[in-house]
């Protein structure tokens, strides 16, 4: 059978998932995968001819998606990249294969597997992760391309056709919701946001939207990136290296940076000033020991998710609609995969019909010195119609595909050859 189909069918599609369901924020932080790991990871996979893989690493989950025939080898490379043991990794990972893995990808993209139900930030993170890996490759993977595109379409349909995302309940909004619920005279509070990545930007947007003239300042390692956000929302920006000085007058600190280790420590709160610290980073970018300071209240992603249950209860009612869309799109994807898997059989069958057509048209032209264009169009339509029926049969009866293809080949190719030989003996 076609080697390409064997390489990229669902028999080799595997997802290795570490999520909030089995691992808390601190544990998830140990398995976080950063951009600087991508290039070497991709290089090693291709050098060892292990197929393809890409990693999605967010505040709620780290997942490896792979079409490799040896997912354990992929897991070993991943563990080497992030400096953890394979045994520790396997303790928290869920492994899904074939259609289960595909269905999981679609559910994750739909926001059904998010810690905050209906959080659609994940689909953007999946797209970005895939494209980061793709740019380090010299070829594309048709299976993964189709799977990602289907995931994007599912996300769009669920947004448009259901109320699964109604009501603000993203991680970034959860932070603002917590502030609104627990803080008095918010407009008078000095707010400092560190980090203007996707979650940081969404947090700024929600602050501006829900707090009247918030006294918020932002800082980011990339000054130019923060400058654009500051201009967009008309808020002050400070240099990242000056944030420690700014902390002295900060009432609410929101950390949405992407460091691999804590950047906020006990030493940053020496004067006993009451400060709310919200850590939106995974791994945690705020040292847990800051909470030992009685004047500091520390809240992380896991804590935030508990404060938006009302919205979640409403969203739960939309789950059946979302699952129906996923089932429809999964069915379409599997039909495409089966058709692609049997493409060589279908092309072989059609080529045999075309061979007969060419032979008969040649004979007709030799006898009559003329072939009507309408006859040619009619035979083309007939060939396509017969090919479609053949394709439908072998796709619906995959266990007979090879047998039927061989039989059709004998009938359509071998017998016409024998007839041709008899005529010319």
Image (spheres, rainbow, N blue to C red):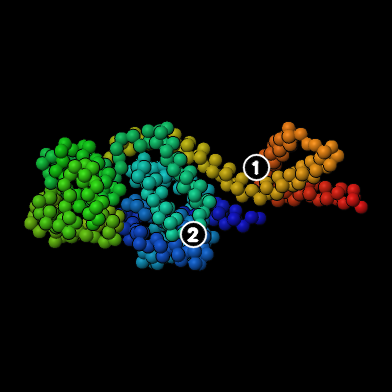
The residue under label 2 is 138
Quarter that holds the N terminus: bottom right
From the viewer's perspective, is 403 left or right of 334?
Answer: right
Mark 1: which secondary structure? helix
Report the front residue among 347 and 81.
347
| Residue occupying the far left of the picture | 271
- Location of residue 154 in the rendering, given as x and y in whole percent from the top left corner: 45, 40
Q: Report the residue at 12% width, 54% height from top.
A: 246
Is residue 95 among the parts visible in the rendering? Answer: no
Q: Residue at x 44, y 34 (%)?
A: 321
Residue 124 visible in the picture: yes
Disc 1 from disc 2: Cα separation: 35 Å
* Residues at marks 1 and 2 touching, judged by CB atoms closer than 8 Å: no
Front of the two marks 1 and 2:
2
The residue carrying pointer 2 sits among few (fewer than 14), some (14 to 19) or many (20 or more) residues within 10 Å by Cα, namely few
Rendered image: mark on residue 234:
none
């Amino acid at each position: 059978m076609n080697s390409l189909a064997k390489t990229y069918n669902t028999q080799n599609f595997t997802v290795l998932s570490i999520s909030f369901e089995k691992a808390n924020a601190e544990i998830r932080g140990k398995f976080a995968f950063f951009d600087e790991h991508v290039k070497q990871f991709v290089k090693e996979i291709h050098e060892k001819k292990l197929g393809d893989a890409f990693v999605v690493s967010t505040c709620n989950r780290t997942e490896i998606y792979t079409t490799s025939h040896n997912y354990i080898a992929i897991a070993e490379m991943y563990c080497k990249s992030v400096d953890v043991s394979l045994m520790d990794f396997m303790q928290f990972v869920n492994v899904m294969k074939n259609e289960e893995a595909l269905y999981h990808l679609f559910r994750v993209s739909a926001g059904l597997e998010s810690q905050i139900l209906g959080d659609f930030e994940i689909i953007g993170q999946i797209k970005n992760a895939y494209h980061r890996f793709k740019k380090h490759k010299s070829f594309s993977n048709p299976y993964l391309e189709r799977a990602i595109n289907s995931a994007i379409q599912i996300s769009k349909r669920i947004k448009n056709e259901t109320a699964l995302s109604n009501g603000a309940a993203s991680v970034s909004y959860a932070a603002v919701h917590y502030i609104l619920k627990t803080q008095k005279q918010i407009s008078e509070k000095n707010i400092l946001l560190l980090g203007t990545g996707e979650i940081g930007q969404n947090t700024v947007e929600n602050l501006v939207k829900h707090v009247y003239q918030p006294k918020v300042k932002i800082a980011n390692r990339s000054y130019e990136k923060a400058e654009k956000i500051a201009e967009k929302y008309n808020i002050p920006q400070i240099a990242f290296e000056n944030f420690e000085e700014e902390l002295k007058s900060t009432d609410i600190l929101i950390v949405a940076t992407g460091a691999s280790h804590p950047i906020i420590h006990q030493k940053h709160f020496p004067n006993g000033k009451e400060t709310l610290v919200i850590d939106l980073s995974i791994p945690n970018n705020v040292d847990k020991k800051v909470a030992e300071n009685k004047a500091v209240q520390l809240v992380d992603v896991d804590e935030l998710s508990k404060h938006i249950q009302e919205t979640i209860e409403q969203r739960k009612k939309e789950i059946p609609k979302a699952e129906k869309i996923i089932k429809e799109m999964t069915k379409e994807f599997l039909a495409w995969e089966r058709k692609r898997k049997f493409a060589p059989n279908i092309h072989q069958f059609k080529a045999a019909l075309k061979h007969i057509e060419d032979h008969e048209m040649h004979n007709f032209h030799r006898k009559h010195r003329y072939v009507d264009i309408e006859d040619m169009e009619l035979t083309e339509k007939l060939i396509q119609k017969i090919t479609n029926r053949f394709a439908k049969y072998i796709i619906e009866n995959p266990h007979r595909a090879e047998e039927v293809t061989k039989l059709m080949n004998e009938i359509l190719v071998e017998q016409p050859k024998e007839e041709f030989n008899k005529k010319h003996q």
